[in-house]
Every structure is written in structure tokens, then in C-alpha cells.
Amino acid sequence: MTENVFKLAQDQFEIVAEKMELEQHIREALKEPELCVEVSLPIDMDSGVTKVFKGYRSQHNHFLGPTKGGIRFHPNVTGEEVKALAMWMTWKCALLGLPYGGGKGGIAVDPKKLSRHELQHLSRAYIRAIYKILGPEIDIPAPDVNTNAEIMGWMLDEYEKLCGKHAPGVITGKPLCLGGSLGRETATSLGGWFCLEEALKNIKCKGKTVAVQGYGNAGYYITKYLQENGFKVLAVSDSKGGIYNKNGLPSSEKILEHKRNTTSVIGMKNSENITNEELLELDVDILVPAALENAITKKNADNIKAKIILELANGPTTLEADKILFEKGSVVLPDILANAGGVTVSYFEWVQNLSGYYWTEDEVHSKLSQRMKSSFMEVWKIKSQFNCDMREAAYRKAILAVAKAFKARR
Ligand code: NAD
């Protein structure tokens, strides 16, 4: 699944850097992360056995500010994957005008196989192993796949114990009572919705049907926003498979309740089970990949019927697939734009932590809306200027901002 994902990130960068005639030394500096550490985490399991897990943290660069990016718990996490995800964070932060470089971390683990007690031990052990390279002015983690506010709370607590001081700005996506921001949990999808709203003002799209791959934080909330705004979500899925109803699925909350009771969306009333492969190729107007990398490849891109692809996942589309989709006239709203709502509200959280002054949910939403919509319009204009796809346009803007900071430091 995650094979070659760092190569994909490097190629995406190199292709645009070449077109922009970016100086060779800047390309060299941005092609590899500044740092990628691998740590070994021995954990005493409830059974009395000691198991050793591998953890990673990559900091792509600090040219615009401290590195920022989530922590993923998944069996397929590797050093290569976090390097790719950290590089994508660099472009995302630069594109949205956030004062950050890109970072990302993870642990190779299936958290569903751990007790709550073991999960807490592992989360704290990870922070003990890497806390020296973290800090509100150094590197600031956040949640990603299979991590959440509760885990961020444990991690913050461990960091503060090690440093002997309060430092809420070291981690975002925390519980509200520990300095989290209102609106952080829904931010990735709400940002995606704002981006889609702008896109629909500019792109002719005949209907309002949608398929969503992945039903976690990103997938659930985008389903909710789409349904609230009159879209018909025909299919959703998770790692076990998908569900489909040609007339529209039940409400997002009902699907979530079913998933909570049974561990999967499959088997939901008033729907038929389908595979993840079938979901991606459904006859819908909008496709939302909201799971993992490499979902849309040269194998299925030709069969994708959606006019708009809203990339809430990071890296869901390969280079070959991008080309096929562009030639077919589908518009890909690229990950570094479409899912940037998460890091944008993480930035708001960090600003609130540093100033000690907390905002209302309305303030968070209106600032998020403004950032997402203006970023969409800037990318849309670059796309028209260079007659390129949205990914290239977004990369052009992001690379320019990082290169400018790189030069200003020399
Ligand atoms: P999550 O852990 O809450 O949910 C992930 C979902 O994807 C789960 O429903 C899981 O069952 C499903 N899934 C896993 N493998 C799958 C597969 N092979 N096919 C179909 N579904 C599969 O994670 P999340 O936070 O929603 O993140 C999803 C994606 O969004 C990731 O690519 C992540 O990097 C990206 N993202 C998340 C945030 C955020 O703030 N949470 C921000 C930006 C980007």
C-alpha cells in the first residue's frame, strides 16, 4: 500500500521544480528531509510479554518555521511513509501561508490490537524517545490516522513531565480542557467542504452524488457536511469494505452508530455491501478519497467517473493516475489544498496556546473559511495562468514560498 510513497512525493516535487526552473541547490535541499529518526519502543504488554514497536519522526525542513504534522498509528507505517507525509506537510503549510515547515511521525502498530492501557504506554514511550526534537518552536505534532485528542493529551502530559513546564503549544488536536481549539476535530473536513464549495462555483458539475472512501475523522465529517448541504452520499467505506445505495445512504450519524456497534460500515441497513475498488469507480459526481495513499492508480483511473476528486487523504493519487484524470477532464482538488483545514486549525490552536487567549467556534470557522477559500482562488488563478492541473498550480505556489524563505536565509 505505502510502497514508493516517498518516491511519489519526490517526483511530484521534481516535476514542478523542473518546470519552474528552480535552482539545483534548492532542489537538493528540498528533495530529502532535514531529519528522520527511527526509534525502538519496548512495551510491557498486559500479558506480561514485552513487545518492541518501531516509531518514526521526520522533519522535512524548518525554512518557514517549526515543523508541523501528525502522528499516525498503523501497521504499514515506515520511515519512507513519514518522509513523504512530512514533505507534503511542507507544501501544505506553505500553500496556506502558515509559518511552518513540514513534519510527520508514526508508529508501526495496529492500535486495535492494543488495550487502552497498552496504547497509553506506547504513546508515552514514543514521546520519551523523541521529546528532545519536539517543542512549540521546533516541531509540533497533531493527530492523524488512528490517533485522536485523547492520545494527544497523553503525549502532551508526557512531554510536559519531561520538560518540567507547561507547553500546550507543543502538540495540537488536544482535548479542549488541555488547551485544544474549538473546531479542530471537524477542521479537515470543514476545510475540504469550503474548498469544494468554491470549486463548484468554478467547475461545471452536473449532479450532487458522492462516494467517500474511508469513514474515520475525515470521511465521517465530510459525509455529514455534504448531506447537510443537500448532496446525496451514495457510498462510504472503511478498511473492511464499503456500502452503497443508489438513492443515497442513511444519515452520517446512523452510519457512525452502526460502525461503532459492529466495527465497520459494512452490513448497514438499507444498503448493499461493495468493495473499496467498486466504490472508487461508481458513477458519482464527486469522489472523496479519505483513507490512505495510492487509492487511485493507473489501474483504476480510467474507470473513475467522478468529475471532481476531493483529496482529503494524503497522497491518494499516483502520478500516472493524475495524468489520466487530467486528460479525461476530471478535476483533482489536491491533498495539500483540500485537506489543509486540519493543519490550519492546528495553527489557530498553537496561536491560542502561545497567546493564552481562546477563540469562539464561530471565530475559528470564519477564519478557516477565509483561508481555505482564498487559497482555493489563488490556486485556481495559477491553474488558469499555466493551463495546468490544480496539483501543479498548488505546488507552484508552495514551492515558491519555501524557496523564497530558503534564499532569504542565505
Ligand atoms: P482515521 O483513522 O480517523 O480514519 C481512517 C479511515 O480510513 C478508517 O475508517 C479506516 O477504516 C479507513 N481505511 C483504512 N484503510 C483503508 C482502506 N485500505 N480502504 C478504505 N478505507 C480504509 O484517519 P483520518 O484522520 O480520517 O485520516 C484519513 C486521511 O486523511 C489520511 O490520509 C490522513 O493523513 C488524512 N488527513 C487527516 C487529517 C486529520 O486532521 N485527521 C488532516 C489532514 C489529512
Image (cartoon, rainbow, N blue to C red):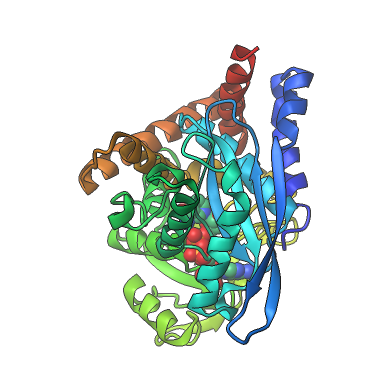
Residue 276 locus on image (x, y percent): 61, 72
Front position in the image: 158 or 363: 158
Q: Estimate the x, y position of residue 119 in percent, counting from the top left.
A: 53, 71
The quadrant in which the C terminus is found is top right
Quadrant, the N terminus: bottom right
Residue drawn 70% across and 56% down?
A: 39
Residue at point 40%, 85% (across, down): 270
Image height of 85 relative to 42, above or below:
above
Q: Residue 409: which quarter of the image?
A: top right
Front residue of 353/73: it is 353
| Residue 324: image location, x then y, percent | 70, 48
In the picture provided, is 298 more to the left or to the right than 385? Answer: right
Q: Is residue 60 visible in the rendered structure shown here?
A: yes
Can the viewer see residue 311 in this picture? no
Residue 73's image quarter?
A: bottom right
Residue 197 rendering spot, x and y as whole percentages:
36, 45
Q: Which residue appears farthest toward the front when viewing the image?
A: 164
| Image position of 115 with respect to 139: above or below | below
Give residue 56's quadrant in the image: bottom right
Question: Looking at this view, is 7 or 19 the one in front?
Answer: 7
Name the residue located 59 percent from the left edge and 36 percent from the top edge. Answer: 90
When the figure is inspected, residue 52 is found, relative to residue 103, above or below; the finding is below
In this rendering, position of residue 104 left or right of residue 201: right
